[in-house]
Image (cartoon, grey):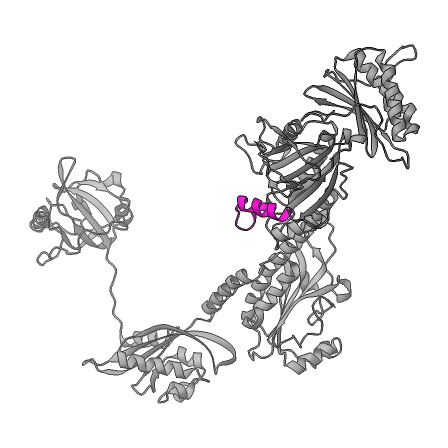
């Protein structure tokens, strides 16, 4: 670089014209900013790398110190003037580096500009590289030794020159090619498309590049290779086409990699479409024939060997040491797989020579390019297979162990017969990739099947096996699992006998699938049974169940679906209903669940406007109940949302279809339940469904009687006498004494400790129930009186005499009830002459 004050760079000659290419690329250049007086005011790392001077050494000093020769002030002034005019300048100068090394540099000087109020020039430079020319020997060596096959053909497509690489590709000596056409020297039908392309290029003058084709050569006739060819016309000085240039590149590796990628991508769409082990194995066999092999069979271990599991058995080395395998998939280019010795589903002990099973544990594929049926390992050890090999011309084999997640699953074997090209090392990678993808799918299917089976067993054990509606309800249920792809769901239902001849009906749906959903379903069903046994009203029972789901959510480990507070939410819906046959009243409440369907004896269908409570687990929101009076013989249907959503997800249309299906006449309840599910869901659905049907019965007037009891201790004896007469009328004389004692204790406690009105009710159904109601909400307590106590033995005595007893609360107070079993064959009950009629209980009451 030269200072504008101290002279231009050394060297004669006029100034070159301004470079029309514009500003230089400064990324890799040495760059400096020089003021109009020649002082360096900017210095880059590129300049430091080129000349060895740091910025601290050069900034503020004259740029002339870098020149290798004496400065030429006249030339420097001319460069400065041109730059001030905005033209800039470029040329070559010699500079001296810090190590005194002379460096020839191509320099550019920009147009002048102002920097910090001073005139400045941006000077960039790059070390000049030597230029060399190609002589004839270099060019000849380039053409001859190039890794690309090259040839020149005349207009008649006869070879007139070719290099060594093309000679090696084809395996035909140079002297046998020269003067001949490709059709004379290339094997098979390979030459026809090549000559057609060459003639097209000669006629049109348009080159053809990267034309890929498969073929073989005389140098390696047993192996198929891929080539990429380009053709371009050759012309003389007058642009006459005098021949054609021909370039060939061996792209077998690239073609194999592309084929492998395409094969794997296709396999991903074809293998593993289901979570069925046998179907997945068959998909592998179907996919590989005829794309890759002519005969494929997949054998899976009946008990996969988990190599990574602590304490796993060591890998076997002989067929007898290995667990049995079973043929799970098979396909052939011949209809019916006549090459097979074993049919699908049968046990198999096939292991390729040398009958060493160690390769199954290591996962290494076994390649047998040439099958010799007369070999001892086939003729003696497997004579039937040897005969099939001869009969169908099976000539090549690859066996690939099927492994996934350190688990040996089985063996996939590929064989060729109609395809004359034997398997070679290039075919091992595609076979391995195909089997690896299928192995993951098989292992997923195996794991899913195991988990699905466990979930089904768990769910079956948690769902009720028998439903008891007593004399109040005839019940039937139907459960339809979800499609196997989705897994076991969390739908559940139950029928719970309650006190006072009442029956509780519950149905729910846990969000999700699998073992977790089934386990959660079991916990909720148990909780509902416990809460129902406490005789809670439906809305209160759902509130308690909501609290339970909140606690269960807080116990869930991190990583699940979380709400805003970070707690895992166990989503669930539920509907709970209590039917009282004495009043024909059904009290129900729901938590995010679809409303029930009701069909009257006349066939009218309705969905009661039941208040929609929030799903379980949200917490803090109330639930409301609804009382519905059902005529005797009404049909009540509880269901999960999967039954009405259907494929189109139209809930309203689904409810219409449900009402139409459930209102049909002439079918027993069990058959009706199955028919409704089959009609609404003829094919497997992504969600499981549950349907619970209940036909109502009213308690006959002659089976229930009640009396008002005055708040007078003397009324106890009168009440006891009424009970005795009623039991005599019912033919239950055997229960008279125990019933009188129970009634006496319950009525006495109500008169002594509670407030009126007090009412006694007897119900006769499958058991005899005594109920005493009062207006107090105080909870009775079972006491163990001491021998010196005068009282405190009433409820203890009731507990000893009754089969069950308990307390339930109403909005008017409470009811204490006790049940006794009936004699083996009681006579049919008849109404008592003179006993007061039993008025129907108001909605929501229990007596």
Task: Determine whether, in the image, residue 109 is placed left or right of residue 779.
Answer: left
Q: Quadrant of residue 163?
A: bottom left
Magenta-colored stretch includes residue 776: no
Q: Position of residue 792 (x, y in %)?
A: 86, 14
Main SS of the magenta part reads: helix
Residue 12 vs residue 701, the one in the foreground: 701
Task: Determine whether, in the image, residue 646 is placed left or right of residue 251.
Answer: right
Residue 531 vertical placement versus 200 (above, below): above
Q: Position of residue 144 (x, y in %)?
A: 36, 77
Is any part of residue 297 visible from this angle?
Answer: no
Residue 177 vertical placement versus 473 (above, below): below
Q: Position of residue 684 (x, y in %)?
A: 62, 53
Residue 193 vs residue 233, the one in the foreground: 193
Q: Which residues are magenta?
A: 643-662
Query: In the image, what residue occupies the spot 69% across and 68% down?
Result: 344
Task: Determine whether, in the image, residue 653 is placed left or right of residue 195.
Answer: right
Query: In the image, what residue occupies the spot 8% across and 58% down?
Result: 14
């Amino acid at each position: 670089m030269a200072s504008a004050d101290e002279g231009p760079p050394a060297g004669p000659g006029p100034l070159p014209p301004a470079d029309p290419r514009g500003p230089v690329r400064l990324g890799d250049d040495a760059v400096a900013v020089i003021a109009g007086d020649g002082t360096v005011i900017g210095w880059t790392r590129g300049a430091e790398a080129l000349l060895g001077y740091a910025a601290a050494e050069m900034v503020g000093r004259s740029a002339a110190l870098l020149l290798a020769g004496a400065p030429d002030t006249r030339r420097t002034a001319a460069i400065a003037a041109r730059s001030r005019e905005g033209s800039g300048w470029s040329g070559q100068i010699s500079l001296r580096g810090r190590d005194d090394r002379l460096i020839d540099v191509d320099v550019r000087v920009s147009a002048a500009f102002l920097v910090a109020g001073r005139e400045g020039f941006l000077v960039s430079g790059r070390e000049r590289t030597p230029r060399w020319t190609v002589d004839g020997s270099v060019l000849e060596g380039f053409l001859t030794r190039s890794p690309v096959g090259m040839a020149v053909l005349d207009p008649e497509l006869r070879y007139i020159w070719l290099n060594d690489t093309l000679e090696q590709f084809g395996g035909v000596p140079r002297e046998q090619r020269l003067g001949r056409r490709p059709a004379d020297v290339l094997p098979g039908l390979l030459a026809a498309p090549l000559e057609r392309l060459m003639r097209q290029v000669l006629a049109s003058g348009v080159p053809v590049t990267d034309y890929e084709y498969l073929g073989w050569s005389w140098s390696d006739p047993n192996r198929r290779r891929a080539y990429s060819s380009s053709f371009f016309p050759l012309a003389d000085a007058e642009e006459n086409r005098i021949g054609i240039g021909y370039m060939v590149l061996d792209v077998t590796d690239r073609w194999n990699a592309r084929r492998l990628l395409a094969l794997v991508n296709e396999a991903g769409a074809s293998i593993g479409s289901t979570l069925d082990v046998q179907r997945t194995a068959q998909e592998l066999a179907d996919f590989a024939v005829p794309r890759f092999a002519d005969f494929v069979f997949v054998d899976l271990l009946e008990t996969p060997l988990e190599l990574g599991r602590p304490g796993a058995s060591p890998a076997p080395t002989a067929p007898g040491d290995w667990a049995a395998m079973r043929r799970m998939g098979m396909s052939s280019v011949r209809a019916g797989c006549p090459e097979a010795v074993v049919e699908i589903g049968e046990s198999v002990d096939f292991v390729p020579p040398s009958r060493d099973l160690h390769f199954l544990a290591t996962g290494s594929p076994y390649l047998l390019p040439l099958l010799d049926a007369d070999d001892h390992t086939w003729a003696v050890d497997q004579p039937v297979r040897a005969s099939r090999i001869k009969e169908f011309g099976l000539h090549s084999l690859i066996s690939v162990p099927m492994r996934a997640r350190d688990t040996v699953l089985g063996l996939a074997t590929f064989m060729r017969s109609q395809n004359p090209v034997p398997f070679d090392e290039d075919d091992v990678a595609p076979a391995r990739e195909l089997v690896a993808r299928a192995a993951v799918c098989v292992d997923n299917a195996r794991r899913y099947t195991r988990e699905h089976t466990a979930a089904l067993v768990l769910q079956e054990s948690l769902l009720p096996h028998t439903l008891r509606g007593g004399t109040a309800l005839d019940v039937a249920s139907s459960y339809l699992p979800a499609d196997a792809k989705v897994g076991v769901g969390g739908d559940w239902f139950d029928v719970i006998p309650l006190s006072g001849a009442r029956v509780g009906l519950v149905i729910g749906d846990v969000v999700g699938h699998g073992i977790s959903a089934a386990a959660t379903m079991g916990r909720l069903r148990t909780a509902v049974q416990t809460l129902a046994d406490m005789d809670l009203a439906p809305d209160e029972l759902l509130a308690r169940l909501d609290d339970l789901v909140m606690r269960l959510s807080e116990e869930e480990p991190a990583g699940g679906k979380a709400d805003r507070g970070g707690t895992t939410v166990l989503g669930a819906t539920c509907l709970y209903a209590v039917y009282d046959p004495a009043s024909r009243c059904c009290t129900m409440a729901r938590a995010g669940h679809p409303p029930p369907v009701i069909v009257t004896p006349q066939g009218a269908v309705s969905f009661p406007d039941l208040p929609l409570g929030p799903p379980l687990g949200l917490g803090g929101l109330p639930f409301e109940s609804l009382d519905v009076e059902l005529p005797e013989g009404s049909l009540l249907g509880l269901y999960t949302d999967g039954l009405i959503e259907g494929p189109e997800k139209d809930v309203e249309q689904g409810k219409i279809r449900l009402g139409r299906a459930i209102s049909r006449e002439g079918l027993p309840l069990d058959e009706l339940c199955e028919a409704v599910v089959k009609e609404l869901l003829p094919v497997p659905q992504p969600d499981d469904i549950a349907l619970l049907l209940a036909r109502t019965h009213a308690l006959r007037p002659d089976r229930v009687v009640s009396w008002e009891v005055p708040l007078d201790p003397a009324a106890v004896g009168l009440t006891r006498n009424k009970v005795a007469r009623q039991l005599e009328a019912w033919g239950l004389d055997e229960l008279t004494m125990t019933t009188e004692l129970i009634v006496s204790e319950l009525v006495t406690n109500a008169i002594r400790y509670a407030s009126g009105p007090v009412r006694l009710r007897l119900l006769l159904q499958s058991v005899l129930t005594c109920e005493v109601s009062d207006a107090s909400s105080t909870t009775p307590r079972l006491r163990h009186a001491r021998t010196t106590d005068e009282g405190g033995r009433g409820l203890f005595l009731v507990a000893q005499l009754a089969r069950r007893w308990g307390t339930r609360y109403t909005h008017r107070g409470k009811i204490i009830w006790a049940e006794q079993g009936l004699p083996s064959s009681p006579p049919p009950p008849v109404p008592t002459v003179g006993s007061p009629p039993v008025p129907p209980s108001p909605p929501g009451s229990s007596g």
